Each structure stands twice: as structure tokens, then as C-alpha cells.
């Protein structure tokens, strides 16, 4: 299965092209802004490098959040545009799932895995995962949520845990990890498109007629339109 995987949800631009378990081409660069200008040229370069046409793809996979409002829309627009043009299925993967899946079972060592992302406004996006017996990937044990850093006690376990992502240092600096048995994982704090591709391959092609991936917003955007209008589409 040949998959094009994209991420522009946080502070990086990550693109991978895989065939089954082999990575054919990969590019990952830290980038807080400018995703719109760089994403498509990176995709084109990697497709050329791997001698692959969009028609050769079996699926496009993309980060759906939580993340920055603008970054999510850029990645989703690119992924859905390619999927429509090439008549290929498109699958969404959450940023928290990707971060958790980047933790090897050996590093987790039986501990709960907590990917935590800086959400600004003194909040973090967070979700808990753990490896079950003989499982290849960690599975979620609660729902993703936006939580105030000062309310960390509402989600941090009293058992040993490993925390990764940009939110971990914020919790430590705020003194929210004192007295707890934890480890701050020294891992990439942004989603890696290679992991997204692997997760997409393991999930398989979406059923025909499935809705396209939509952004996972755990709260409204920081920016407001004139008059204080929230630009997030209203739920019907």
C-alpha cells in the first residue's frame, strides 16, 4: 500500500511517502509558520524523488488535530485536494495519537503515555495511552481534551507515567509534576509523518463513502474576526 502522509498541525512541516513498511521519501522541518508556502513544494519534491504519481497512491493520510487553527486547515486542504483530484481515499489521524505511537513499548515500560501539546492560553491538549499485552501500538484510555495547566491534577495519574510533547515542560515549569512519578521523554514534540503513514497503513483504507477527515478542535481559535466573531464553522 502506497501512502502519502502530511502534518502541518503544530510547529513543523512533515511529509512522508511510504510503500507498505518502507519509507520511500521523507522530509521534516521545524516551522512555526509558512506551512502554506512550503507544503506543496515539499510534496512535489518527494513524489519526484520516489518516482511516484498521485494516481499511484492508495491513500492520503493527514493530521486532524488538535493543533493550530491555521496549520490544521492548510494540511487538511492539501490532503483533501489531492484526494479529490486523484480520486483516492483520505484518512485523518490525531496529533495526540501520532505522538503516543512514536513511543516504543520498551521506553514506555508499562507506564501510561501522556502526549501533551501546548494549546496557548495556559492550556494544554492532552490524552492518555498505554500498551496492552502484546499490542503493537498504545491504545487510548480516555478522550482528548483541552485542560488548564493549573488543573493538571484532573488528568495526571498517581501511577508512573511518561509525558511527551510541548506541554510536558510547561507542566514541569508550573510545578504540576511535583511529587509524581514521571519521565519527560526526549522525543520529537511534533508529529512525524512516517508515524502517520504507519498508523494509516495499520488502519487500512476507509470504507467507500466515508466522510472526509475533519479538524479536531477542542476549543475555539485564538483569533477572532471583527466584532469578536468566532471563525470556527458553527455546528449544525
Image (tube, rainbow, N blue to C red):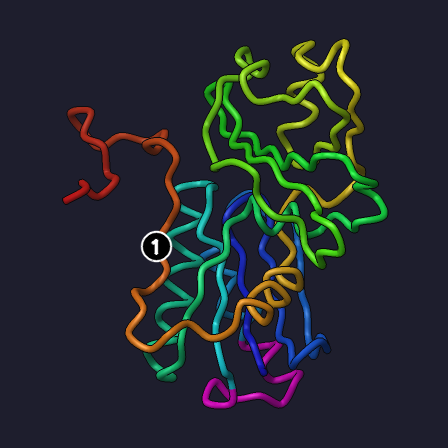
Residue shown at 38%/76% (left/top)? 83
Q: Which element carries disc 1, helix, strand or loop?
A: loop
Region of the chain picked out in magenta, as a range: 44-56
Q: Position of residue 137 (x, y in %)?
A: 68, 55
Question: Which quadrant does the N terminus fall into?
Answer: bottom right
Residue at 63% x, 21% y: name it. 156
Image quadrant where residue 2 sits: bottom right
Q: How many marks?
A: 1
Image position of 61 with respect to 55: above or below: above
- 10 shown above or below 88: above
Task: Single out the residue that lies furthest toward the front.
Answer: 133
- What residue would you read off at disc 1? 214
Q: Along the line of sight, which residue is nearer the eye, 160 or 229?
A: 160
- Please tell me which residue is depicted at 21% across the width and 43% down the height of the picture: 233
Nearer to the camera, 34 or 120: 120
Image position, residue 43 (x, y; %)? 54, 72
Horizontal relation, residue 215 to residue 197: left or right: left
Answer above or below: position of 190 versus 228.
below
* In magenta segment, residue 55: yes
Q: Is residue 30 magenta?
A: no
Q: Position of residue 211 (x, y in %)?
A: 29, 65
**Is residue 130 left or right of 40 when viewed as pictured?**
right
The main secondary structure of the magenta stretch is helix
Q: Is residue 168 above or below residue 174?
A: below
Is 120 left, or right, of 224 in this rendering?
A: right
Image x and y of residue 37, in percent: 47, 59
Q: Residues within 10 Å of mark 1 (few under 14, many from 20)?
A: some
Quadrant of the rendering where the C terminus is positioned = top left
Q: Residue at x 36, y 68 (%)?
A: 80
Amino acid at each position: 500500500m502506497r501512502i502519502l502522509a502530511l502534518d502541518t498541525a503544530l510547529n513543523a512541516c512533515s511529509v512522508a511517502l511510504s510503500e507498505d513498511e518502507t519509507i520511500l521519501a521523507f522530509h521534516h522541518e521545524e516551522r512555526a509558520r509558512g506551512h502554506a508556502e512550503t507544503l506543496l513544494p515539499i510534496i512535489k519534491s518527494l513524489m519526484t524523488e520516489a518516482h511516484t504519481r498521485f494516481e499511484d497512491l492508495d491513500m492520503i493520510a493527514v493530521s486532524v488535530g488538535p493543533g493550530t487553527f491555521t496549520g490544521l486547515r492548510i494540511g487538511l486542504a492539501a490532503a483533501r485536494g489531492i484526494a479529490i483530484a486523484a480520486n483516492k481515499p483520505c484518512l485523518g489521524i490525531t496529533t495526540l495519537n501520532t505522538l503516543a505511537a512514536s513511543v516504543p513499548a520498551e521506553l514506555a515500560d508499562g507506564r501510561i503515555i501522556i502526549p501533551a501539546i501546548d494549546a496557548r492560553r495556559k492550556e494544554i491538549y492532552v490524552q492518555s495511552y498505554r500498551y496492552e499485552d502484546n499490542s503493537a501500538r498504545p491504545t487510548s484510555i480516555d478522550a482528548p481534551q483541552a485542560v488548564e495547566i493549573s488543573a493538571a491534577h484532573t488528568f495526571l495519574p498517581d501511577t508512573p507515567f511518561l509525558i511527551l510533547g510541548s506541554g510536558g515542560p510547561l507542566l514541569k515549569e508550573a510545578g504540576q509534576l511535583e511529587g509524581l512519578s514521571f519521565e519527560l521523554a526526549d522525543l520529537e514534540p511534533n508529529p512525524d509523518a512516517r508515524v502517520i503513514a504507519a498508523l494509516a497503513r495499520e488502519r487500512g483504507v476507509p470504507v467507500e463513502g466515508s466522510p472526509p477527515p475533519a479538524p479536531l478542535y477542542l476549543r475555539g481559535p485564538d483569533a477572532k474576526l471583527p466584532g469578536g466573531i468566532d471563525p470556527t464553522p458553527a455546528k449544525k
